[in-house]
Image (cartoon, rainbow, N blue to C red):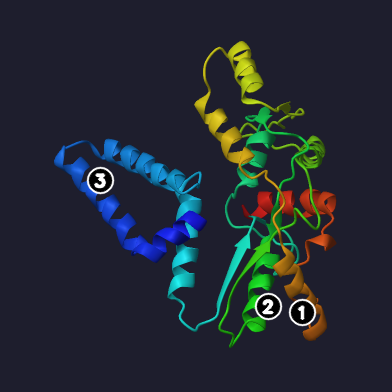
């Protein structure tokens, strides 16, 4: 992020990246390559540009670009940036368990309950940072009110890893127990029996298992493991969010209505009785 900040002070960063993309695209079109080649090449080019500034992919790269451009273009306006971690189904509002589509951890749960995902590359003690979507909405609402009419720029990390961490081992235990008691029914009307996932801490052991077990590279499964593993990381510093929660408690009459404190979440109850049932009903 700091390197990108320096680049912006020297020239119009947005224009530079846009021009590079257009040049690359025109170069490919001039070569009369197929649309498939263009798509693959441009994806790789985007990742190359992202990694140049220290980002693993274009998703987080473009988010960082957006934040920097906002801060440099805000003039005297107040800018509030909310950075939620993995967003999951609602905790309370409009009702517990509401979710739209499959998101991040949900695709892993779906693969597991259907018996298609039997192993994962992850440290079982690593913390998975997630937060219910209604808590994210509450944090946005409170942040808008708290920072109104202020010529400032502030970032709020909204997550659970610091205040109420949950590791993969616990998540897996809750999911295993749920689908052991409430198995997924396949298209033939038969219940799918699940077992505990095989956990691999290193890529070397994962590859060895895949070679011995299947003898063929299962690229799709590798992708799931890689994508899932990216959501396990060090706890986010949410001191700004904690200050915002304190302001809410002290200043808001309806502070409970706008609750976004992850400490109140009982993860076992939430995952087994709210998130998974909600995913099955609304996902």
**What residue is rendered at 61% in x and 42% in y?**
230
Give the residue number, with chain letter if any, for mark 2: 142
**What residue is rendered at 83% in x and 61% in y?**
263
The percent coordinates of residue 218 (x first, y second) are 53, 23
**What residue is rendered at 70% in x and 47% in y?**
234
Q: Residue 259, can we see it?
A: no
**What residue is rendered at 74% in x and 65% in y?**
239
- Disc 3 to disc 1, C-alpha distance: 49 Å
Give the residue number, with chain letter if any, for mark 1: 247
Mark 2 nearby-residue class (10 Å; few <14, some 14–19, many ≥20): some
The percent coordinates of residue 76 (x first, y second) are 49, 84
Of 182 and 239, the residue lying toward us: 239
Mark 1 nearby-residue class (10 Å; few <14, some 14–19, many ≥20): some
Of 152 and 44, the residue lying toward us: 152
Select label 2 or label 1 by which is in front: 1
Give the residue number, with chain letter if any, for mark 3: 24
Of 30 and 95, the residue lying toward us: 30
Q: Which mark is residue 99?
A: none
- Disc 2 to disc 3, C-alpha distance: 43 Å
**Residues tagged 2 and 1 counted as in contact (Cβ below 8 A):** yes
The percent coordinates of residue 75 (x first, y second) are 45, 81
Select label 2 or label 3 by which is in front: 3
**Secondary structure under badge 1?**
helix
Q: Earlier in the sequence, mark 2 or mark 1?
A: 2
**Secondary structure under badge 3?**
helix
The percent coordinates of residue 35 (x first, y second) are 26, 40
**Secondary structure under badge 2?**
helix
Q: Earlier in the sequence, mark 2 or mark 3?
A: 3
- Disc 2 to disc 1, C-alpha distance: 9 Å
Q: Earlier in the sequence, mark 3 or mark 1?
A: 3
Q: Residue 268, can we see it?
A: yes
């Amino acid at each position: 992020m700091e390197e990108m900040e320096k680049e912006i002070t020297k020239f119009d960063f947005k224009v530079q990246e846009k021009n590079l993309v257009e040049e690359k695209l025109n170069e490919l079109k001039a070569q009369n390559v197929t649309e498939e080649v263009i798509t693959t090449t441009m994806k790789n080019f985007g990742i190359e540009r992202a990694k140049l500034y220290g980002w693993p992919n274009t998703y987080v790269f473009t988010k960082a670009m957006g934040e920097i451009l906002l801060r440099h273009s805000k003039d005297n306006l107040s800018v509030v940036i909310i950075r939620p971690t993995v967003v999951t189904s609602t905790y309370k509002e409009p009702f517990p368990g509401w979710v739209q589509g499959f998101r991040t951890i949900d695709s892993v749960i779906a693969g597991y309950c259907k018996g298609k995902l039997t192993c994962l590359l992850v440290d079982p003690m690593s913390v998975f940072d997630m937060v219910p979507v209604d808590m994210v909405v509450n944090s946005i609402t409170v942040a808008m009110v708290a920072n109104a009419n202020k010529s400032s720029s502030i970032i709020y990390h909204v997550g659970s890893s610091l205040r109420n961490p949950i590791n993969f081992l616990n998540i897996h235990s809750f999911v295993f127990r749920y689908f052991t008691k409430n198995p997924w029914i396949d298209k033939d009307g038969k219940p799918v029996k699940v077992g505990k996932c095989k956990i691999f801490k290193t890529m070397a052991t994962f590859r060895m298992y895949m070679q011995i077990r299947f003898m063929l590279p299962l690229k799709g499964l590798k992708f799931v493991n890689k994508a899932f593993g990216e959501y396990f990381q060090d706890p986010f510093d949410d001191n700004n969010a904690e200050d915002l929660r304190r302001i809410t408690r002290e200043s808001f009459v309806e502070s409970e209505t706008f609750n976004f404190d992850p400490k109140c979440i009982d993860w076992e109850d939430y995952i087994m009785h709210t998130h998974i049932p909600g995913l099955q009903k609304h996902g």
